[in-house]
Amino acid sequence: MKRDAGREMTPRDLAYLGDAVFELAVREYLLARCPSPAARHRDAVRRVRAAAQAAFLHALEPHLLPAEQDLVRRARNFKGAPVPRGVAPADYRASTAFEALLGHLYLCGETGRLHEILNMVLEGAELP
């Protein structure tokens, strides 16, 4: 993939892609650790909801590179779609920023950094 491809997309587009990247990473992670399909589903839902993604982003922020911090700030402040019912606006904006970061790393081919961030999130972050 082209290295600058992520810079050509809006934060909303990057978040759309990042949502799929994170969903796949969570499913792969849980498939290796949860024998029960019901337990996998429950845990996956807990991890991909906006409040959890916002918590993941807050835990990651001290570890982000300056360019990643800038992308997260732009994505968090992006005026996009209305906030879904039942989701706190701050959580929705932070989860969008988290997904945009993942989408950017994926699209730019920065798989090493993407895996590093996913490992930090999946192995170390506490779910709200």
Image (spheres, helix red, strand yellow):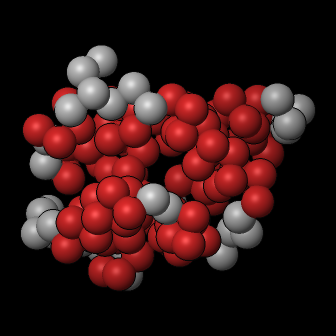
Residue at position x 33%, y 41% from top?
A: 104
Considering every residue shown, the one lying at the far top of the view is 1
Q: How many marks?
A: 0
Say left or right for 27 vs 82.
right
Residue 77 appears anywhere in the view:
yes
Percent across and percent down for residue 78 are 15, 67
Say left or right for 9 vs 86.
left
Percent across and percent down for residue 65 are 45, 59
Say left or right for 38 vs 67.
right
Residue at position x 17%, y 42% from top?
A: 7
Q: Nearer the viewer, residue 73 or 128?
A: 73
Residue at position x 63%, y 43% from top?
A: 116
Percent across and percent down for residue 117 are 59, 48
Q: Is residue 58 above or below residue 28?
A: below
Q: Locate the N terminus by quadrant.
A: top left
Q: Quadrant of residue 71?
A: bottom left
Percent across and percent down for residue 32 are 82, 29
Q: Is residue 82 above or below residue 16?
A: below
Residue 86 appears anywhere in the view:
no
Q: Quadrant of residue 87?
A: bottom left
Q: Locate the C terminus by quadrant.
A: bottom right
Residue at position x 71%, y 64% from top?
A: 125
Q: Quadrant of residue 2?
A: top left
Considering every residue shown, the one lying at the far front of the view is 66
